[in-house]
Structure formats: C-alpha cells, structure tokens
Image (spheres, helix red, strand yellow):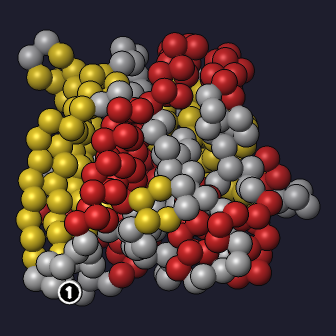
Amino acid sequence: MIEIEHGHGGRKSLDLIQQLILPALGASGAPTLDSARLSGLGDDDLVFSTDSFTISPLFFPGGDIGKLSVCGTVNDLAVAGGRPEYLSLALILEEGFPLEDLRRIMESVGATARDAGVKVVCGDTKVVERGKADGVYTNVTGVGAALPRHPFGPAAIRPGDKILISGTIGDHGAAILAVRNELPMASQIPSDCAPLWPMTRAIFEAGGEHVHAMRDPTRGGLAATLNEFALDASLEFVIREEDVPVRAEVAEMLEVLGMDPMALANEGKLIAFVAPDGADAAMEAMRQSPIGAQAAVIGEVGGAREDGRVLLETAFGTRRVLEMPVGEGLPRIC
C-alpha cells in the first residue's frame, strides 16, 4: 500500500523505485537515481527530465508553484550536465480554482522561464471535479543540450574529490514548514527556489573537466542526496557538520521543532563533486553567482564501499553515519 512517506525522497522512496518501478520497466543492472538522463538523438546528445509538482501552499515566501515548476525541471537538467532549452507544461486544475490565482501562476511560469533562458513550447490542460486536485498540480518535462564531453555522473566520482554545496541548506523546507504552521518567523524565511543553470554554466566554464558529478538536493535534502550518490558510486563520503552552511533563522526554528536541516528540501542549491585541482575554480564560480555567496567545501570522498556510506564528522570530532531519511517527513513539498 502506498504511504505518504513514499513521496518524501527518503528510504521508502528509494525502495519503491528500486523494488517496484524499475523492475517493472525492465531496468537491468544498478541504474543510477538521477532525475535527468543523457540520451543520444542523431548526432546530438540530449538531457531529458520530467517532474510533477504538488506543493501546499501554492504561494509561499520566495515563490509559488509556477516558479517551482520551472526551477525544479531546469535544475534537474542543469545538474545533469545539460543546457536547458525547452519545456512542456501540463496543468491539472480543480473545478472552482480562481482564475486570478491561475493568472498569477502562469505569469510566474513565464517570468521564471525567461530568467532561466528556456521556452515553454507545448503543454496540456485537464480539469477534475471539485475537491480532487487541491487547486492545481503541474507536470513539466524539459529537454537540454548536453555540455560535458568527459565522464560525468556518479560513476565518475573518485576518492579524494571535494564535495561542494552552493549555499545554505533547508531553506525551502523551512519556508514551507513555517507558512503551514503559521509560525511568527514565516516572513523571515523565504524559499531558496531559483534556477541553477547560470551557476552550473559558470562552473563548467571555469573548469568543467574537473567536475565529476552534480545534483540538486530537493526532497530528502542533503542527507538523501548524499546517500543516493554514495550508493550509486559505491564510495564512502565524509562530511564536516561545522562546514555545512545553515541560515541562523532556519537553525533556530528547526532546533525548537527538533528537526534536522540535513533532511529538509532545497530548491535552489546544488552539490558538486570536484577533483582537488578544480575545487577552487568551482568554488569561485559558485560564489560569483547571486545565489552562491555562501558556497562551501563540506567534505571529501573516501574509499570504496560497496553499499555506500556517508559519515558525518561532528563539532566534537566524533563521526556518525548520516542515514537516509526514514519515516515522517514534510509531504507536499514540491
């Protein structure tokens, strides 16, 4: 039976994909868990991705479902090594949904697409009965041109690689959590929702041959994404907790609520695995971006480990395993 946790991006999501979805589709071997995939079409290499969005509330500090729909898809293409080009947009609308709210969402889609340098070229609209769609759901498919001409992805990660994060973690999840619970600091914690393509382009231009893999830590946050990478690459990662940037407002709110920023979603951050010789250039490229001022090196890749593992080095100098998030998370986050 499907449970709400199957959509949180943690252990149950991973089990659902690996144990049911991929076998039913005939996937063989150990496929990676990327949100976008490189494919050949004639003489060109393309990056292809699709994503659905069911966020609640539809409008939140720093964005809305329209902005999120474009950023989420563009970001999947960008961190897969693609230059985003074209999007499709499908809308599932609930009977009675206000036209003015739909206009706001569509204007947000248009503005964000222009900022990201992509075009919405096709789509679809369906309407379901009142109470069946929670306002509006979207599905966006994106196509882009592949950039790296060198090994890129989890299999390219090597022991000794530096692990970089482009900024503070947990901002999107914290923003949604604060709004849903009508917390006093809700207006002080905006979502980080933003297109990553300009930043990834700068990273590749600064020395793309040193960049081995990237991914945006959305559902399940940094913890889930690092564990997925470690599993795909069959390697051990060591992360320094003190070096992981967290906004003071987010840290304070989550401490009161007893929640871990490592497991909260982000919608405008990326993780990069970079060879030591290219780490400084990649870091500088991140920090030159308006959304990368707080970029940091948070750890290194260790040795081979068949089952993959992420170790967190605490402020006290001890180490513990950073587990894949399990159990109750924050549903309807993206």
Height in image: 17 above or below 66?
A: below
Q: Residue furthest right?
A: 316
Q: Residue at x 50, y 82 (%)?
A: 328
Q: Which residue is mark 1?
A: 131
Given residues 225 and 194, the one toward you in this image is 194
**Residue shown at the point (40%, 53%) measured from the top left:** 68
Q: Residues within 10 Å of mark 1 (few under 14, many from 20)?
A: few
Residue 110, position as x, y percentages in the image: 31, 41
Q: Is residue 215 above or below residue 321?
A: above
Q: Which residue in the rendered view is the most extreme toward the front?
A: 100
Front residue of 201 and 79: 201
Location of residue 232 in the rendering, given as x and y in whole percent from the top left corner: 42, 47
Residue sitting at 35 percent across and 27 percent down?
Answer: 117
**Residue 51 can be seen, yes or no:** no
Q: How many marks?
A: 1
Q: Is residue 134 visible?
A: yes
Residue 241 lies, in percent from the top left, at: 77, 55
Which corner quadrant of the image does residue 184 belong to? bottom right
- Report the amino acid beneath label 1: Gly
130 displayed left or right of 267: left
The foreground one among 295 and 15 is: 295
Nearer the observer, 247 or 2:
247
Quadrant for the C terminus in the image: bottom left
Secondary structure under the numbered disc 1 in the rendered image: loop
Query: If the image is split into quadrants, where does the N terminus sit?
Result: bottom left
User: Relative to 328, is 146 on the left or the right?
Assistant: left
Q: In this image, 47 relative to 321: left or right?
A: left
- Tell me which residue sits at (36%, 81%) in the image: 4
Horizontal and vertical percent position of residue 265? 53, 61
